[in-house]
Amino acid sequence: MNNKQIYLLWFVALLPAMILRDFTPNNELRYLSIVDEALRNGDIFTFTNQGEIYADKPPLHFWLMMLGKLILGEHRMWFYALLSFIPALVIVTTMTKWIRRENGENETTAPLMLITAGLFTGVTLVVRMDMLMNMFIVLSLYTFYKIYRGEGRKRDSWLFPVYVFLALFSKGPLGILIPFISTMLFLLYQRKQSDMKKYWGWESLLVILSGCVIWFTGVYLEGGNAYLNNLLVHQTVDRGINSFHHKEPFYYYALSVWYSLAPWSLLAIGLLIAGLIKKRIHSSLEHFFVIIILSTLVLLSLISSKLAIYSLPVIPFIIYLSALLLNKLNPQNRWIVISVAIPAVVLLLALPAIIYLGRTDEMRYMAIPSVYAGAGILTITGLLIIYYLYRKRDTVRSINTLALGFLLAVFVTGWSMPQLNSYTGWNNLCVKAKELSEERRIADYWVYHIARAENMDVYLGKDIIKVDKEDLVKQPITNKLLLLPTKNMMNDPEILAAIQNREQYQIGNYTIVIF
């Protein structure tokens, strides 16, 4: 199997989920609401969410979403999914081309590992700007290394700062901090600090600063001092030093990296540690990858605000470095075999686990044929891996089998999204609520105890009204349509009493009550 076939297989595997799944309530629906407000208000550089300043993210990804809404006339999951898949594809192709001269043998193994790494797969499917930023970070570091090796073209000296600025313009300060710190440390390690001006001289600063001046001027003209201060101080200094959001301890990424790299955690981290201890890291490229990985993890650990997704920039470099080291350290080594066998054993349990969960009240919605089929594929994959490891003694084939089995399971399970959407998103809930509202001529949507429910306006076409318990228990209530989590209703006798004998409809984990 060549790389083009791998990329096509990857796209096909993700396609059902990319087309059929609903937007997630926590972030994706909020981004849609922000895009709607920006288009409605004619904003370009500044954004609001329910009328409140939203300076958390730079404009580039929102511009792409706005363009999609303008062209297609409505929000389309497949288009927004491509805004993550295409950058992910660029990352994989760039990294594969980068290591080709170092190790052609594992040229297919490395991309297979990356496209099936837990965090990378997850971010490829979600509507977020993280993959876009990561693409520009990888392109900037790849361009830097080409110039360093004397293989860069004339335009690369300009492309390098352009990529750095676009990384900054996609997600925020990490887009410039990661390339700056890793390249500077690499030059110091190689004792070529005198070359720093070649990469971070006045030409690069001119490109980056010019982009920032245009951006910040646009922000000031549209949003004034309040928005500019929020963007430059609140979202950078406050988040970095004493975070108001996602505050975690220093060692957070030492724990999260294990599930971010799954199912390759033991293999990739083990190979990295073994390569360092046994001094098998020799080439300048391998040293550069190590510096990128370690410096980025230290940088992320020093920042107060932490989420597993923030570590996405190191995932490609850990995976591809481990592929480079795999042949240097005998693939049939016992601990390498064990590091692949353990995930295989976990996969063996996939089908029994889904059968058990599908019989529980909380996870009964998982009892879907395509989910069972996907779990069955994982179980069979586990058996094949064990066979190749211990009967054929072929570790590389076992790794490739794990990746291909995972992609097939994702493809099959993806067809279950229409049945799962009522439990993962709000579209079905809001469609039913809107239908009932029009039938009964009910003007107001009341919402109780649903986080970020204000972004339902994307589906409902109007603002919801958040209510508390006191609003529900007082009587009488007329001409209202209430949306609330079923669990909250069942666990609170007062609320249950207030809505008894009322017409009710259950959609997923939520209940619609008509007053």
Image (spheres, rainbow, N blue to C red):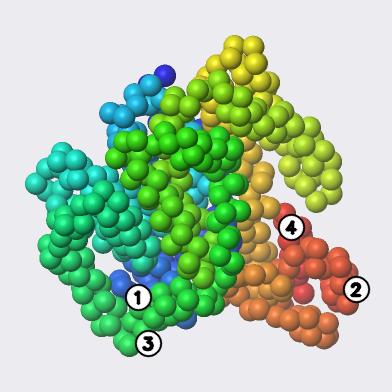
Query: Which is closer to the viewer, label 1 or label 2?
Result: 1
Query: Which is closer to the viewer, label 4 or label 1?
Result: 1
Crowd around label 1: few <14 · some 14–19 · many ≥20 (10 Å): many
Q: Amino acid at mark 4?
A: Asn
Crowd around label 3: few <14 · some 14–19 · many ≥20 (10 Å): few
Q: Which residue is mark 1?
A: 46
Query: Which is closer to the viewer, label 3 or label 4?
Result: 3
Is label 2 in a helix, a strand or a loop?
Answer: helix
Query: Which is closer to the viewer, label 2 or label 3?
Result: 3
Q: Amino acid at mark 2?
A: Pro
Q: Position of residue 319 (x, y in %)?
A: 46, 38
Quadrant of image for the N terminus:
top left
Q: Amino acid at mark 3?
A: Ala
Is label 1 in a helix, a strand or a loop?
Answer: loop
**Residue at 58% from the left image edge and 60% from the top image edge:** 252
Q: Are marks 1 and 2 in contact (CB under 8 Å)?
A: no
Q: Is residue 14 visible in the rendered structure shown here?
A: no
Q: Which mark is residue 226?
A: 3
Q: Position of residue 143 (x, y in %)?
A: 23, 46
Q: CA distance from mark 3 to mark 4?
A: 39 Å
Q: CA distance from mark 2 to mark 3?
A: 45 Å
Viewer-nearest residue: 58 or 458: 58
Q: Earlier in the sequence, mark 2 or mark 3?
A: 3
Q: Are marks 2 and 4 in contact (CB under 8 Å)?
A: no
Q: Earlier in the sequence, mark 3 or mark 4?
A: 3
Crowd around label 4: few <14 · some 14–19 · many ≥20 (10 Å): some
Q: Is residue 291 visible in the rendered structure shown here?
A: yes
Judge whether 50 appears above or below 509 on screen.
below
Query: Which is closer to the viewer, label 3 or label 1?
Result: 3
Query: Which of the 4 image quarters holds residue 185?
Result: bottom left
Q: Which residue is mark 2?
A: 493
